[in-house]
Amino acid sequence: MSNQDPYEVTMTKKDGTTMSIAEYFNKQYNINLKKKQPMLFVNNREGGRTYLPSELCHEASLPEGFTRDAFKMSKIQNYKITSADERKKKILKLVQDFGLKDKVKIF
């Protein structure tokens, strides 16, 4: 976690311009982040950090009763042991297959 809030942490875009994390989320997703919240960070492969506003991070868990459905549990096993990019693609397909597209917000 970082002591800096999303208005202090900046990022450099591909075109070389810099902006705060708060500005990025406002322009990209029309989300106004709260001030004075911790930022979570993930070290990436290139040695840099990816900052995530804590207010947008939620516990990942399966819906109640999901684990009692053997079919759904067998479908999800293949998603748990893949790379992050491949897992995202598979999860998006799974969301679509189960008709949850309108109930899930994807960034």
Image (cartoon, helix red, strand yellow):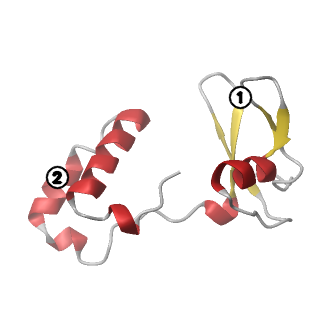
Instruction: Tell me if 81 is positioned left or right of 33 in this view.
Output: left
The residue to which callout 2 is attached is: 75
Taking 45 as reference, is 102 left or right? left
| First of labels 2, 1 by sequence position | 1
41 to 100, vertically: above or below? above
Mark 1 secondary-structure assignment:
loop
In screen coordinates, is 85 left or right of 25?
Answer: left
Instruction: Estimate the x, y position of residue 102 in percent, counting from the top left.
Output: 37, 66
* Residue at horizontal 16 percent and vertical 61 percent from the top: 72
- Quarter occupied by residue 36: bottom right
Q: Residue at x 30, y 39 (%)?
A: 81
Q: Residues within 10 Å of mark 2 (few under 14, many from 20)?
A: few
The residue shown at (81%, 54%) is: 6
Query: Hey, what amino acid is under mark 1?
Result: Gly
Look at 59% across and 25% down and name the residue there. Answer: 45
Disc on res. 95:
none
The answer to which of 15 and 59 lies nearer the viewer is: 15
Q: Is residue 102 left or right of residue 16?
A: left
Q: Could you tell me residue 11's position as x and y percent?
A: 79, 36
Query: Residue 17, percent across and down?
Result: 83, 29
Who is closer to the viewer here, 101 or 54?
101
Secondary element at image label 2 = helix
Residue that sits furthest to the bottom in the current view: 64
Q: Residues within 10 Å of mark 1 (few under 14, many from 20)?
A: few
Name the mark on residue 48.
Answer: 1
- Tag 2–tag 1 contact (CB < 8 Å): no
**As drawn, 34 above or below 107:** below
Inspect the image, locate mark 2, and give the three-letter code of the amino acid beneath it: Lys
Q: CA distance from mark 2 to mark 1?
A: 34 Å
In this view, 65 is above or below 55:
below
Please state the horizontal and vertical placement of residue 68, each as a whole percent of the image: 16, 73
